[in-house]
Every structure is written in C-alpha cells, then in structure tokens.
Image: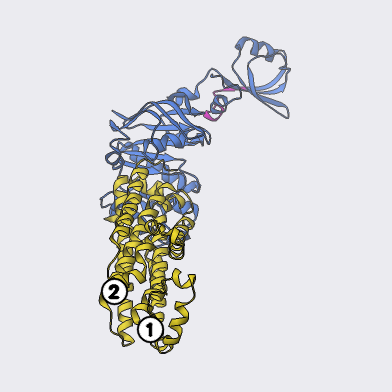
Amino acid sequence: MTLVRHELKQGKTSFLIWAASIGFLLAICIFLFPEMKEQMHSVNEVFASMGSFSEAFGMDRLNFGTLIGFYAVECGNILGLGGAFYASLCAVGILSKEEKNKTAEFLLTHPVSRIRIITEKLIALLIQITAMNVLLYVISVGSIAAVGETVPWKEIHLLHLAYYLLQIELAGICFGISALLRKGSAGAGLGIAAMMYFLNLIANIADVAEFLKYITPFGYCEGANIVSNGRLDGGMAAVGAVIGIGGILIAYLKYTRKDIR
Amino acid sequence: MEIIKTTKLTKYYVKARGIIDLDLTVTQGEFFGFIGPNGAGKSTTIRTLLGLIAPTRGRAMIFGKDVTKEKESILQDIGYLPSEALFYSGMKVKDVLKLSADLRKKDCTAESKLLCERLQLDTARKIDDLSFGNRKKVAIVCALQHRPKLLVLDEPTGGLDPLMQKEFFDILRERNKEGATLLLSSHVLSEIQHNCTRAAIIRDGRIIACNSVDVLSQTSAKRVTVQGVVDLGQLRGMRDRKEMKGSVSFLYSGDMGSLLRTLSSGQIDDLTVTEPDLEEVFLHYYGKDGETV
C-alpha cells in the first residue's frame, strides 16, 4: 500500500482546497435558508414560473419553502458540480500525471507491476472521493442542525448517495481516459464533468432529449425526482455503474500495455 | 553467466524507427559501454530492457528471465539511472529515497546514508529546490541504495561537476569489483574508454560494432602528425585532415610504403604515428560513408 499512501500525500493539498471550497459554499447556502424561508412564499411562485429555466433545475416540482426543496436545488447544484469537478480532475490526472511530470520513469522502473500501480491508484482515488463525501455530508447535516431545522434524513441520505455514485461514475470514466493520455489532462476532466451537467439540463428542458438522462450521471441525481419519489432511479444508476466500471476496465487494459515515454 | 541477452530485439514506434534486430550480450561482472549519438536507439534499448516499452519483435532476457514476462522480479535487482532525473514535486529528498526503498520493500537506510555522504547530498532539502546536478545525485542514490546486481546508466554524468563525476565513477568501479554488472550508455567516449571493458556502437537503430574497448580503439588507421613542409597531394587513404601552422595531422589507413615515400620527398622536422583514440574511431564509424574500418 506504499503507493496508496504516496498518492494520498500527493493529493492532500488539492483535497483540502476543494473540501474547504465546496464545504464553505454548502454551509453558506444552508445558513441563508432561514432568512430566505420568510420570503419564499412569494419567491416560490416566481421560481416555479420561469418556464424552461425552472424545468432545467427542477424548480417547478420542488417547494423552495421547505428545507429539502431548497437543499435539493441550491446545495444539490453545489454538491453536484463541485463534487463532479473534484472527482473528474482527481481521476483524469492520476495515471497521466506520471508521464506528464516525467515521473513515470522513476515509478515504473521499480519492481511494481502495472496492475498493482493501477489498483493502488484506484484505491487512493476512491478513498479521496469517499473522504470528500463524508466530510461534505457532515458539514451539511451539521449546518442544517445549526440553523435549527430538522434534518430530513431520508432525502439527505438519498441525495448524498446519488452524488457519491455520480462522482464514482465520473471518476471511473476519467480514470479510463487518464490511461490513454500522456499530457495535459485537467481540461479533459473538467470538460467531461461540465458536459454531463449540461446534458442533464438539456434533458430536463426538452422531452425529446429525455434519453440523455441515461447517459449522464446527473440524471439519477435529479433532486426533484429523488425528493418526490423517495428513491433513486435504479435503471439510470445501473447504466451509470456499467459506464463507470467500463472506464476502469479500459484503464487496466490500456495501461498494462502502454509504451511509456 | 549472461546478465543481458537480446535476440533480434526490434522496436518500431508508430512513425519512427527505434531499434532493429539488436543482438546484445552482457555477461556477469562486465562494465559494458553503449555508445551512440542522440537518437541512435540507446534509450529505446534501455527502455525495452526495463519494460517501459514493449518490443515489436525479438526477445530480451535479463538474469535469464524474459523482460516482458518476469519484469517485477528482474527490476528488483536492477538499479536504473535515467538521463533526466525528475521526481514528485513537493517531496523532500529523504522522502523520495524512502519511497524508492519502500517500492522495493527493502530497508536501505544504511546504504543510502553512506551514498548521500559520499555524494554530499543534503536529504532534508526539497526536490523542487535542487539544481539539475543535485537531482542527479538523488537519482544515483535511488539507483544504488538497494545494491542491485545490474546497474543501467543512461548518460549518467550530465550535470555533475568533475569532482562528483570522479566520485561517482569510483563508486561504480567499487560496485563492479564487488560483482555487479554495469551497462553504461553514453556519448562521452572518454567515459567509456576509461571505465568499460567492452562496448557496442549503435547507429541508426543497429549495432555496427561490438568488441572490447581495446580492440575497438585499435584499427588499421593511425593518427599521423607531421611537422615540416611536405606535399601530400597524391596520397590515398587519408581522412580527417587538419592543417595547422607548419604541421598537418590526418588519419591514415592506406599503404605504409607510399606514406613513407611521400614523406621522404618533403622537409620533415618531426613525425608522430599513434593509435587513434576511441573518439576518432567513433567519428569514423559515424563518417558520412559509414564504411567500417
């Protein structure tokens, strides 16, 4: 587990910066809720009647006056985008950075098999994403309790679980891409995360694009659906799992055969 | 015992040639030199031996094991010094040395301390603050601290000052005496001539000569230096002619009789005939026509 430890040390600064940024935004949002709740009765109608815009963010189906309605939209977007960006960035660089920073020659001339390198890097990646989610969950629940609201446990759990799955899926895809790249990779990671996010917005607006929900992991993270159904969409999550595992398999297939320059 | 043996080892990149039908044998305890200019295929050979790239054709065996099948067990006993020593930024020297030892599952503290003292390397410093030469020292310690049976050195002296180069080669010779086999790739011919017992010359991906360094240096050509006035106009077999004030110097591989007859017709103050050094032999191998001596 030498490499796992090494990767965690290498990723520490980035982890702390992302955790602080996302956690800070989440907490701010929650702390704003009590004040906004007062004005929500009028605002709610406005938010719900902005046509496509409301639909895109599921605001036509959620009640902004309740904590969970507010949380699903506001905090859901922060958690969804922030988490997706972090997971993608982390994953897309984890293999390719060795060649980019020319440390591959050092690492791969040690008696460690490529399979073990991939596996330990994958474990390190999953540990970082899991730790990030646990931390953000604690911050969220703590903030909700701090503003004196009752925590809607079931919905919070489902939302956080959905975003955790989303990050793992994106990490899986980006991990596969990481094995193919030699140079700059941050752009690819951020691009994929952003593309997935916008695919979901498009799917929300246009009925003909509904199928996109099965491609993007944001499909099963739709706060409005989770809150009103009280469960995740199993079909979408299953497709997501297959895509994520596919990415990881590509990483193993490619990186074990890759010529290192 | 054969430590390195390649048979028809070939590597093509997508667009470029790498190495073609390379047959190379290095036996135990040898200090083997690998000579060639940049782009000739030295690094490709080394990277294939270390399993960084997969051969297109042919085989490479180290310690009698196939490099593509038993890479991990082979690498356990290899020390590799890359030409460009780069490490993870943000780490301290001692952390890098520890990481390298941990990846080998070996405790190398004592040996590492010894090497750092000899090379005057401060292990408390951060990698990012080190000069090129000092980073090279870190790579040297990484390559030597686990006392490998085979040392692979790719252009090792770049960035080291002359004193450090001497210390470095002293260490290498000690290791060699203790039984380690060394493969030294270089384009600095004096390094090869002073340290190696045997050497191979690589050109355009092929080995064009492989022999003991003494034999490689001995060719039928001689370096002739003449002081005085002489007309060399008709003489055949001259190469690398250098004219200086009152003297002329050239590599001669023609008929000795005609050389002497030509010289006797002139006014000669002084004459030296010497074996060319490896540098000149090397230039000869890399001459425009490419004919061998």
How much space separates mark 2 and mark 1, taking CA atoms? 16 Å
Position in image of residue B267 (x %, y %):
73, 18
Return the disc, 2 or 1, that comes first in the chain's sequence.
1
Q: Is residue B98 visible?
A: no
Colour of the chain lettered A: yellow
* A68 up-or-down from B56: above or below: below
Magenta stretch: residue B276 in it?
A: yes
- Give the foreground label among 2 and 1: 1
The residue depicted at 30 percent of the width and 81 percent of the height is A142
The residue depicted at 34 percent of the width and 66 percent of the height is A163
The residue depicted at 29 percent of the width and 67 percent of the height is A161
| Residue pointed to by mark 1 | A65
Instruction: Say what amino acid the circle numbered 1 marks.
Output: Gly
Position in image of residue B162 (x %, y %):
50, 46
Q: Which numbered circle lies on residue A155?
A: 2
Instruction: Say what amino acid the circle numbered 2 marks.
Output: Glu
Position in image of residue A58 (x %, y %):
41, 71
Pick the residue in front: A173 or A206. Answer: A206
Colour of the chain lettered B: blue
Judge the density around disc 1: few (<14), some (14-19), many (≥20) Cα neighbours within 10 Å: some
Judge the density around disc 2: few (<14), some (14-19), many (≥20) Cα neighbours within 10 Å: many
Indicate left or right for B95 with B106 as reference. Answer: right
In the figure, residue A256 lies in which quadrant?
Answer: top left
* Image quarter of the C terminus of chain B: top right
Indicate left or right for B204 with B74 as reference. Answer: right
* Disc 1 element: loop
Q: Chain of mark 1?
A: A
* Disc 2 element: helix
Pick the residue in front: A252 or A163. Answer: A163
Q: Are marks 2 and 1 on the same chain?
A: yes
User: Residues in magenta?
Assistant: B272-280
